[in-house]
Image (cartoon, grey):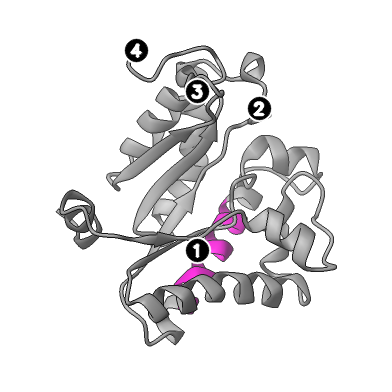
Amino acid sequence: MSELEAAIQDGASILTDGGIETRVMFETDVPLPPHVQVAGLVKDPIGGPVLRRIYESYVAAARSFGLPVIIGTPTFRASLNFVRRASLGGAETVRRLNADAAAMHRQIRAQSDHRPIYVAGVIGPGRDAYRPEEAMSAGEAREYHALQAAALAQSGVDFLYAPTFPAVEEALGAAMAMGATGLPYVVSFVLERDGRVLDGTTLHA
């Protein structure tokens, strides 16, 4: 069992980061690259330092309260569909974007005197996160998300995190892809006001 898994099982308080894209949009003048969004800023001479400062603010907050912190890679849209829509290439670009993002987070951790800092490799839905009718089947999702899951796992993240999924089927496939890497993983969903996943699934289903 990893240190993070043990902390979660013990019910320890752990700080996480927040909406990185939202902070870039409303707190800075840095434009988000089309389709891949913050993943396209990691190596940008202006956007990269902005991203670092945002993530470092969460580390600073965790330090002030003496808490562990999780920082998630800015890779929510660093998967094949979005890379292709942005005309940035294909699978090799996916691997590079995810590796660069993980490297930035490992560097943030290495340069900080705060511990523990956990790096989550973030995987978003392959299509619109708020349109469950566009979600992939479990089989399609397993194949689709395998590329990004492997890229992040090979880049030294502590665990994989698939947030904001609108449909259980695609989340199931993503979970299978993440599980195949051997790393711990977490899946979370977009919920309606009635507590259902956007595809209508109840949480107790």
Residue 116, by quadrant, is bottom left
Q: Which residue is mark 4?
A: 205
Tell me how far mark 4 sits from mark 1, CA to CA. Answer: 34 Å
SS class of the residue under badge 1? helix
SS class of the residue under badge 2? loop
Q: Amino acid at mark 4?
A: Ala
Q: Amino acid at mark 2?
A: Tyr
Give how far across and how far down residue 29 sits, in percent: 85, 68
Labels 4 & 1 near each other (Cβ < 8 A): no
Q: Which residue is mark 1?
A: 102
Give how far across and how far down residue 64 sits, in percent: 41, 81
Find the magenta span and give its range: 95-108
In front: label 4 or label 3 = 4
For marks 2 and 3 on the same chain, the one whose residue lies earlier in the sequence: 2
Tell me how far mark 4 sits from mark 2, CA to CA. Answer: 20 Å
Residue 38, by quadrant, is bottom right
Which one is nearer the viewer's eye here, 196 or 45?
196
Q: Which residue is mark 3?
A: 170
Tell me how far mark 4 sits from mark 3, CA to CA. Answer: 16 Å
Which one is nearer the viewer's eye here, 159 or 16?
16
Give neighbour class at mark 4: few <14, some 14-19, many 20+ (Cα, 10 Å): few
Give how far across and how far down residue 69 sits, in percent: 39, 66
For marks 4 and 2 on the same chain, the one whose residue lies earlier in the sequence: 2
Query: Residue 130, labelled with which disc?
Result: 2
Q: Relative to 65, is 73 on the left or the right?
A: right
Give neighbour class at mark 1: few <14, some 14-19, many 20+ (Cα, 10 Å): many
In front: label 1 or label 3 = 3
